[in-house]
Amino acid sequence: MEDATDDLVPLDWDQVEARAARGDTSHLRELGARLADRREAAAEQAREYGRHLAHVVRVLALTRGRDSLTQLLRLLDEKQASTGLHPRFVASLLAEHQEPADLAAVVFDRPHTDRLDELRGCLFHELILRGVDIDDFRPLRTWTIVRPGWSALAWLPDQLRAMETAVDFPGRSLRGSARGGGSGLPTEGRMDPPTPRTSRRSALQDVATTAVHTSIVAAPEAGDWGNHGAWVFRLDEAIAPKRVPALLPTLPMPCVDGLGPTARFEIAARPVDEIWRLLFATASMGGMYGEGVHGAYGRLWAWRSMAGLSGTAEGASAEDVERHANQSTWFHFEADAEWFHNDVCADYGIAALSPDRRRLAVLAATDTD
């Protein structure tokens, strides 16, 4: 195929090289241009197939009943690599629209010889987040025994914890979706420091290790937020929670650089479940231009951020993270510093004071269009 006119015949590379040897480079340029056009047309056709395939999967996932579930699982098992859809997305759709009893019977109660364990792992935690008690369904109880140990999700608790009870989910239909816009700083628990605040900067230094920093920013990193940062400070002495609002704007953090003594700095004490809810929404639903990592992995990365903020040791159990989180004092703040964009529900800061009141960890995240 010297001129690439027949799609069924492969291009003869020997002839291409012979043309070049004879100096017929203009022919090669024209040939390259035609191939580039065909490649772009084929890529667009592949994208179109992908859009159609994604819609078929969506329709099967959202059509209630065991028959549609059975057909969807057959499709995913046979063509999973070709669908281009991550199992965590499909699991989120299923948990939103299918009955737990049907999901337990069809998805979990079947021979584990297919390639759908990642789907099952994600669906398991999607159901937990929606309040399903796994003890009510034998296949779900069995999954905790037979699930693969390599999955990062296996670290998570098998029951919904008290701090996870306030959870936001997106709503999806056959051709659309909607998600909550988050929540700004509440009026309850406000501890705004009086103005003018001191312009003197604190001498404390950030002592966050790479591992701790990575842990703290896990949720906004997973949610693909525009910018985020984390800092940890060892205090010279134990301080009462009421001193934190005045201390935060003075710390050496880019998120408060340039904040004048009268510029807006608002802060509220928050219960641990509201902090977890904010982190979960950040990871699961993502930033303005992303869809996040959905429920199961949103749960995982919210816990990771809580671990880093609360000072839980690396590699600790979920029970240890929960204990440290419950014993910490939590704050939610916003500021008119240049680092933030101050778009509604697209900027926040979190601070955690340790139980001994000698460690202060901070996470700041911002996302804007």
Image: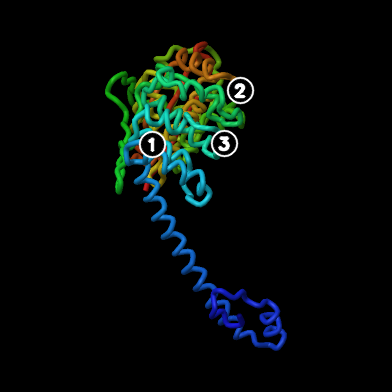
Residue at figure coordinates x 42%, y 43% from the top left? 72
N-terminal of the two: label 3 or label 1?
1
User: Disc 2 designates what residue?
Assistant: 315
369 or 342, which is in the foreground? 369
Q: Amino acid at mark 1?
A: Leu
* Mark nearer the viewer, 1 or 2: 1
Answer left or right for 206 relative to 196.
right
Report if the CB atoms under discs 1 and 2 are less than 8 Å apart: no
259 or 206, which is in the foreground? 206
C-alpha gap between disc 2 and disc 3: 31 Å
Label 1: which secondary element: helix
User: Disc 1 designates what residue?
Assistant: 94
Q: Is residue 369 above or below residue 143?
A: below
Report if the CB atoms under discs 2 and 3 are less than 8 Å apart: no
Colour scheme of the picture = rainbow
Q: Amino acid at mark 2?
A: Gly
N-terminal of the two: label 2 or label 3?
3
Instruction: Assign the N terminus to one quadrant of the image.
Output: bottom right
Res. 339 in view: no
Label 2 crowding class (10 Å Cα cut-off): few <14, some 14-19, many 20+?
Answer: few
Residue at figure coordinates x 53%, y 35% from the top left? 117
* Mark nearer the viewer, 3 or 1: 3
Q: Position of residue 78 (x, y in %)?
A: 51, 47
Q: Position of residue 233 (x, y in %)?
A: 54, 23
C-alpha gap between disc 1 and disc 2: 31 Å
User: Disc 3 designates what residue?
Assistant: 113
Q: Amino acid at mark 3?
A: Thr
Q: Position of residue 178 (x, y in %)?
A: 30, 41
Answer left or right for 90 relative to 317.
left
Q: Position of residue 19 (x, y in %)?
A: 67, 85
C-alpha gap between disc 3 and disc 1: 21 Å
Label 2: which secondary element: loop
